[in-house]
Image (tube, rainbow, N blue to C red):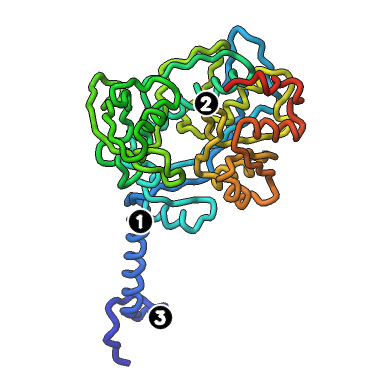
Amino acid sequence: MLPSENIVAEESAEDGEPRRLGRGWWIAGSVMAVVVAVVVAAALIPVPYVALGPGSVWPLDSQITVVDANSFPSDQPVAFTTVSVGSTSALEAALGWWDKDVDVLPEEAVRGDRSASANRRYNAELMDTSISTAIAVAEGYLGEDVRITTSGAIVREIQADSPAAAVLELDDVIVTVDDQAVDDIGELGTLLQVGGPGASHALGVERPAGSTTRIKVQVVTVAAEDKPERAVIGIVPEDRIVDFDFPIDVTIDSDTVGGPSAGLAFTLAVIDILTPGQLTGGTRVAVTGTIALDGTVGPVGGGSQKATAVRQAGYDVFLVPTSEFELAQAAVGDDVQVIAVDTLEEALAALIDRGGTPAELLPPAAGRGG
């Protein structure tokens, strides 16, 4: 039999006669090599996306230290939750999109306009502020006289196409409005109300933050979408707190975790350790949510991933901001009791209702600060 035109290689057959391989095998091998090369490249080439996955659950027992005051460590301390955040390759991004426990988002959706290093510094600052705020709220709730000194308002977010977008940058510190110092909690918003929407204001801005460099920019307010009578410039500000005077010396070690999402957990844990009994009632309780100086609980994102971590760690109860409730509940089903809270008071009530420290061991509402 004459050899076919497809034959391009040969090898010995069992009878010692040459046996030839078809071009199809050569093509298949070439295709396989290309596929392997593509997979390897996809695994190595970074893409501008970030993967958010389940993180860990940290019980706040050894992280809190109280000096020169009575403390009451809990057998079942409050725990805070984290999300794992990492850059991705093309392959990791593709796998993440198929994983129900992972969210793959564009880098700018997570880091904004900040570089990776700037974002790490930003999250470290948020954690420091969160810790101090949590201690202040906890001690204030327990009736202690906490004194807070502020200096300016940090620009944490800028809305696109807002008046601020043309003149301000992330992490600017607004120190004056029309030459009046911004040196009280929430004062920036109050000073911007002068003249109502449409009024022009001169802002004294510290740029970069922490320096002695000051610039002045002019901005015209607009009406808030939800409250037309309120004047805004399109930013999310954060009071720059330069000093806390705490009656009780409390420290919290957050290790290398950044961001503000442990604020509520820190607050509850400090209240727990400074009061007799167990605020968790012996139940394994995990918590997420920011805390503001007025005791308001704020959203943090990553509710689904944190809920998954809570379920995997075997916790019974998960307190979350109301805006995170549906995602958290969907992630854990009936395995974990998810409770929505919007204030410190609601979080405490939820724990007391489930066997936590009896209400009579907590200070009366009339004497609560924070």
The N terminus: image quadrant: bottom left
Task: Determine which of the numbered discs, if any, sits on residue 15 in the image.
Answer: 3
Q: Amino acid at mark 2?
A: Leu
Give the farthest residue toward the bottom.
Answer: 1
Task: Determine which of the numbered discs, if any, sits on residue 293 in the image.
Answer: 2
Which residue in the structure is indicated by mark 1? Answer: 42
Q: Is residue 133 left or right of residue 335?
A: left
- Which residue is at 57% across, 50% downward? 327
- Which residue is at 33% across, 31% downward? 171
- Is mark 3 in CB contact (under 8 Å) with mark 2? no
x, y percentage for residue 33? 33, 64
Mark closer to the chain start, 2 or 1: 1
CA neighbours of label 3 inside 10 A, class few (<14), some (14 to 19), many (20+): few
Question: In this orientation, which residue lies closer to the viewer: 200 or 133?
Answer: 200
CA neighbours of label 1 inside 10 A, class few (<14), some (14 to 19), many (20+): some
Question: In this orientation, which residue lies closer to the viewer: 55 or 292?
Answer: 292
Which dot, 2 or 1, sits closer to the camera? 2
Q: Is residue 168 among the parts visible in the rendering?
A: no
Question: In this orientation, which residue lies closer to the viewer: 224 or 336?
Answer: 224
Q: Amino acid at mark 1?
A: Ala
Spatial separation of the CA atoms under disc 3 and disc 2: 88 Å
Question: In this orientation, which residue lies closer to the viewer: 223 or 313?
Answer: 223
- Which residue is at 47% across, 51% downward? 103
